[in-house]
Amino acid sequence: MAPTNLPVRPTTDLGKESLFNILNNYFYFNNITVMDLFAGTGNISFEFASRDAISVLAIDEHQPCIDFIKKTAAQLQYTNLTAIKADAFQYLERHRQPVNIIFADPPYDLENIEKIPEIVFSRGLLKPDGWLIIEHAKNQDFSKHDNFYQQRNYGKLNFSFFSNFTEKSANNSEEKE
């Protein structure tokens, strides 16, 4: 159980279950690499790690969050999960290795949230047919972004999906048939 003093708003169980049901139709988890931005308690990172993702990078700027993720990952013996203390925007600017999925769950009132897809796609941080998923409030609209694919709503929780594929359907070498 996460300490109550962490500055987080974890993804709801309904949202998490829905997200992983979607991802399960497009990816073999044991073939993907993941970056979890604004990782908080590591809720999403642990889901990917438990599904045997090749590697999961949990990025958060709050040291108590990173400490909690590291401690929990060690207890669960997740050797595929690495927690890194960093500002998400700065980390994206210096990260060089593309991944299959980038999940970002920034504070809903974060300034410049719209820069996340700009940085991800301008820096080529997704593998071919990789996905960027941003959890956000319903007043945020990403639909005009060139790489926008779709938005899903689950109560107050919203996921916007982006990809660098040209067709509006996921069709990659790791897609499930």
Image (cartoon, grey):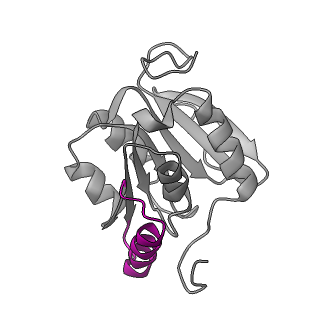
Which residue is found at the position 52% from the left and 42% from the top? 133
Residue 13 lies in what quarter of the image?
A: bottom right
Using residue 137 as the reference point, say whether residue 42 is left or right of it.
Answer: left
Query: In the rendered structure, does residue 67 fall within the stretch colored magenta?
Result: yes
Q: Nearer the viewer, residue 111 or 71?
A: 71
Residue 97: say if magenta: no
Quarter occupied by residue 137: bottom right
Q: Is residue 77 above or below residue 103?
A: below
Q: Quadrant of residue 90?
A: bottom left
Q: Split into 4 quadrants, where in the image is the C terminus?
A: top right
What residue do we see at 42% from left, 76% from top? 71
> Which residue sits furthest right?
155
Which residues lie in the magenta part?
A: 60-80
Figure check: 173 above or below 82: above
**Relative height, residue 97 to residue 72 (above, below):** above
Q: Residue at x 44, y 53 (%)?
A: 36
